[in-house]
Amino acid sequence: MSPDVHPFLVEPWQVREPKLDLAAMGQTESVFALSNGHIGLRGNLDEGEPHATPGTYLNSFYEKRPLPYAEGGYGYPESGQTIINVTNGKLIRLLVEDEPFDLRYGELHHHERVLDMRAGTLTRDVEWVSPAGRTVKVRSVRMVSLTQRAIAAIRYEVEVLDAPALLVVQSELVANEAMPARSGGDPRVEAALTDPLVSEFFRAGETSATLIHSTRQSGLRMAAAMDHEVYGPEGTSISTEAFEDIARTTVITRLEPGQTLSIVKYLGYGWSSRRSQPALYDQVRAALAAARYTGWEGLLAEQREYLDEFWSVADIELDGDAELQQAVRLAIFHVLQAMARAERRAIGAKGLTGEGYDGHTFWDTETFSLPMMSFLLPDAAADALRWRQSILPLAKERAAQLGLLGAAFPWRTIRGHECSGYWPAGTAAFHINADIADAVRRHVAATGDVDFEREVGLELLVETARFWRSLGHHDASGEFRIDGVTGPDEYTAIVDNNVYTNLMAQLNLLVAADVAARHSREAHRLGVNAEEMASWRDAAKAMRIPYDEALGVHPQSEGFTHHEVWDFENTPPDKYPLLLHYPYFDLYRKQVVKQADLVLAMQLRPDVFSLEQMRRNFAYYEAITVRDSSLSACTQAVIAAWTGHLDLAYDYLAESALIDLHDLAGNSDHGVHIASMAGTWTAIVTGFGGMRCDETGISFAPRLPPALTRISFGLCWHGRKLRVTLTAEEAEYRLVDGPPMRLMHHGEPVALADEPVSMPIPPVEPVEPVEQPYGRAPRARHPGS
Amino acid sequence: MSPDVHPFLVEPWQVREPKLDLAAMGQTESVFALSNGHIGLRGNLDEGEPHATPGTYLNSFYEKRPLPYAEGGYGYPESGQTIINVTNGKLIRLLVEDEPFDLRYGELHHHERVLDMRAGTLTRDVEWVSPAGRTVKVRSVRMVSLTQRAIAAIRYEVEVLDAPALLVVQSELVANEAMPARSGGDPRVEAALTDPLVSEFFRAGETSATLIHSTRQSGLRMAAAMDHEVYGPEGTSISTEAFEDIARTTVITRLEPGQTLSIVKYLGYGWSSRRSQPALYDQVRAALAAARYTGWEGLLAEQREYLDEFWSVADIELDGDAELQQAVRLAIFHVLQAMARAERRAIGAKGLTGEGYDGHTFWDTETFSLPMMSFLLPDAAADALRWRQSILPLAKERAAQLGLLGAAFPWRTIRGHECSGYWPAGTAAFHINADIADAVRRHVAATGDVDFEREVGLELLVETARFWRSLGHHDASGEFRIDGVTGPDEYTAIVDNNVYTNLMAQLNLLVAADVAARHSREAHRLGVNAEEMASWRDAAKAMRIPYDEALGVHPQSEGFTHHEVWDFENTPPDKYPLLLHYPYFDLYRKQVVKQADLVLAMQLRPDVFSLEQMRRNFAYYEAITVRDSSLSACTQAVIAAWTGHLDLAYDYLAESALIDLHDLAGNSDHGVHIASMAGTWTAIVTGFGGMRCDETGISFAPRLPPALTRISFGLCWHGRKLRVTLTAEEAEYRLVDGPPMRLMHHGEPVALADEPVSMPIPPVEPVEPVEQPYGRAPRARHPGS
């Protein structure tokens, strides 16, 4: 899938680009993006150009765009929401003796960028000779603060090497940057997204400036402000000016060789759909004041402290594969960046690293990211679910519009409104409601947080259970059916009794009834009574789960195994992803699976599949799954590990982990793949660690893949911190923090207190190999391959 | 469904509007539209205004329009084709002493319009008092010639009643008339359809003028020309001028009371995608010259002769229901108008009477119109199928694009390109291919035209058979399945083994093999060999036809009868048509049928259903069919008649026949419903007449509905003309023209030569009544209701 040349060096804690690779600029902008979940800065060069896609994002700050239809239909959303590039505060332009510092001209002696995952910074070192022959060194360090949510900061240093030079530095805020086209040329969409920001206010001080803008259609207001500390030789001049769409602090100085001009730029961002312009102005100025008070070194120190604390739990050590070690840490780091300070706002599929999928959030958050974050940063996970709770009024409206009870969450959205423009793959993918419910269940199982369960979880569970009860129906034989929906696999749509959907809905109904029983007073307030709870339990019990007796496997949905199998032998590699080369009608009616569906059901509902059944199902679906989605390899890794295909699991783990470092999907320029990155954690902890967690407790069934000599991972559970270390022979469980606890290891109870406990790992039974479709095996990485 | 007040009087051969009804203007413009299948003129007032929709159409003269998608997909058509209002030659404006003749001002003493179905004319009589008090009588007679395809003509007479008056008549050609918006506001579509004609040429003579235009995107060229004969008092002045978008012949005269000014306007139209401007100019001028040579009276005489000949076969007499008598004649007349001179071009769902459905042709032609026209005007029916043959290259390309063999005909089109912007209801409705094949089979059975079978039919049958063979597949049990398609019922989509589709595909495969065997040399030239024919027969034999043993009915498609039944009791009348008030996802997953699907399968494949099975199926589907499509009542009428529900059949017949006279669908302003009108014929002849026709011959099993005392209908069969007359007790068969023949009457052979033969009609077995969904029974019209 990927060429073997990548822009980055392999190091344990850093991602280093040793020289500028213009061709990979879109990818490096995404991988080097910094974010705290509230502010996102793509890894654009300080001077702005050249670029692939300029990107400065504020979580949930979006513009509306028309959703056109050749043939409309009832309930189709008329407008979508799309993340927009907000006021760019990253820009620092440099003039060296009236030559603009631009890497496309002059001579580049050195260009290195380093993302440091412990420092939380992006550093850039450049040595450049201007066309006129002046040599300068530029070093910038950029951060988006994890501790001060509204703040980003840049330290920008210029040194002149061989001769004195007059330098002009322009540090800017720029709104409405010219952007590459992105809508496939629909002029109405381009119109909506060209110059999306309308100036409301601008003001400049001596070293600082503020721009306030609002969007045309979505009615949101944002403020961006900057302030500067400048360290230069005597005579250095500083001035600032502001206009509608630009503010500029200009620093002029003459440097002797060896002298350095150093500028610290503090950036403050804020937005609101309600707060007035003066209130927003004060808000960002206050944030800036606090940042200046903390100072550059103070911000760096806070950042490192925050990350040290995070990594003490979250770090995964993989001995035996340095490339994968780096990839896994990058994956964890990017998921952290996407979620850390999102604070009850949506987590986009790309975090805040690019404009892919219009910045929308999908089921990715609940099914791929929260399984990790509930165990690593439970507060952030809880906030993500509190966001879902906050959009319940919209989800209830949508359900009513669709003729259903309870809540129908949007398939894709930024602020809670359905933004799917193709309903068979969007609206009909109702499983998202059960995915949210399952994330609630899992979060409570991981944290034991009864307050969360009562205040947040209960309402989400009740409204989704009501949804399922109204979506399905009992047929004449008494089975409860859910017809006409789309499961996770997007190469099949509008089917009856998708096993994944039905199993997840079943769990949703059962857990809702249990939780309502536990919090009966609050449930009563939501209108739940014993009859309703009984109707949920009855529907769950009668849930239809199709099974193909002849093949001994579960059909993905009703009738699926009777469909023609896709002609994989005659599908050349350049026809993947299939959806770009074949019509939906053909994909839908054949046995070809874009992404784990039944296989994901086995991961999320291990209680209803025997190991033998898992093996048969896995073998069947491996042979028809093409992984045209990045939401697949991690799940296949888990089930491969559970069913004893450890080498294959390892190959899938690598595919999942390296997705952006190696640009495996060919679209990392649109932003990193947060779900695949989070799935990497799941592949290791749930897959190789065999971790399962429900209301009865936490258990492990670890297996080390032959490629590695050791895996160590940590997690939080019920207020404790736990670290698990695997070798081929044994697993060591260590309670890093918290009161004694019990866990299960391969079915045996383990009591854990101050002392680590080591347990032997039973040998793996040999299994029949499984096969993937022609040409679609994962790249072999395991030893002996 | 409809109010009981309608704009028209009931008369046997005329449709008379006794006074102008501005609110019904859209409907009257459609009902009063004149067409010969090549030119279509909506029944707009001579003076152009007021209007609902100005309309002048040329068959297959279209412009391209963008088809936008919120989320695109492989194989989605990027642009559609839409019929456009071409140069309007109907316009004749009148100035009475400098007051424009406009019915919205002054006083209207009398206004009557009459469509005469034997004369083939639209006549208008007006007596109007101008705001200044001048009284004039205006009488116009308009025709579109059935004998001279390029010609329309108008005789326009003005008489002054009480005082002399100076009159100015402006007879015009106007291109790019301002039109009401029609795209739901998509600005790109509006842009494409505003001023669609680009002037290429204009010329004026003394009494004549020509305008030539071309379209911007579709690259078509058209010419419109007019010439005039003027009869007025001495001193009458005539002059003509022409500009880019308008040509105007001005007649000025002063009339004394009792004097008349009479103008005959000849209109010639032509278009081509290839012919040069001079060639096109000469073409329309020659047509005009021929029309002037024929003269107004000559044109009227030709028209009446053509219609006399047509009605001698086609007329249906219904004794006992004058309103229905009129409606049935109007239906036959409009189908004739849509098809008479279409000559190897597409027949739109609205004919040339309005812009509904963008002027597209669907399966309506083959499944609803040709069953009538193969028996009434076989040459026109053959031409419609020759048009399908002419677009085979495009249909083969489309099949290849979809990864299939043979030909995939477009679901909706004007010139042969797929124009469906919602594939689940469009592209996936592959049954259209079998519908075309069945129209071929039926046409040959009706005409015995072996040359047609060899030259036209064979190729259509072979390429559609190839299509089905590649669309379906054999499953493990050896059954041949057709998965993931959409049947006729548009409230269910993307299903497996739709019974209608599978039965029609089966017949397609069998007939293709038989016809290829009959014309083996020509088949060989198409690459057909014995193996391929065997594979068609094998697939047909193994065709899966799902059956629900528990219910004893055929499910419309796999699993259909397990779906939840729509909650009809809680669906109020104003929520119909359902598709405007409920999302597709909900309609698709429930048992609710928009239009006859399984019931239509029984009409078209009576060979595979026993009477008892028909009764059970009909009862089952009646209870869930809501008739939100105008392509349903006629089919329900047929099966109701066959299964002994004669009163219900009669009610459905009336709904089908009155659709535009009573504006039952509420959208007659977009054009008349050609398929429903043709279905009216089928309801009578195939339903009450019990007519079936296949390669073994023609048979009848007539039953008179209790509401009528007599039905008489005619048809052509194998070069003969036959008339069948039913009373309650007996059927009389009369061979009007042609050699002796045999037919079957209720299973008994009848030999027919010069003398009519009367046969007794057996009594009807009593049957259990059937029920429609709550509120969806047809309006009861039968006696005792």
Image (cartoon, coloured by chain):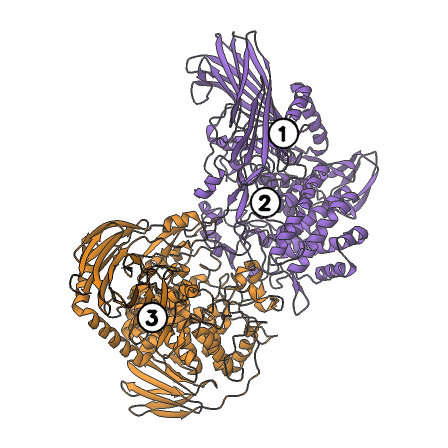
Chain colours: A purple, B orange
| Residue linked to disc 3 | B516
The answer to which image quadrant residue B249 occupies is bottom left
Identify whether B569 is placed above or below A751. Answer: below
Q: Nearer the viewer, residue A574 or B497?
A: B497
Distance of mark 3 from mark 2, alpha carbons? 56 Å
Q: Nearer the viewer, residue A632 or B362?
A: B362
Residue type indicated by callout 3:
Ala
Q: Which mark is residue B369?
A: none
The 10 Å Cα crowd at callout 3, few under 14, some 14 to 19, many 20 or more, is many
Q: Position of residue B620 (x, y in %)?
A: 57, 75
The 10 Å Cα crowd at callout 2, few under 14, some 14 to 19, many 20 or more, is many
Q: Secondary structure at mark 3?
A: helix
Which chain is home to disc 2? A
| Residue linked to disc 2 | A413
Q: Position of residue A578 (x, y in %)?
A: 48, 49
Q: Secondary structure at mark 2?
A: loop
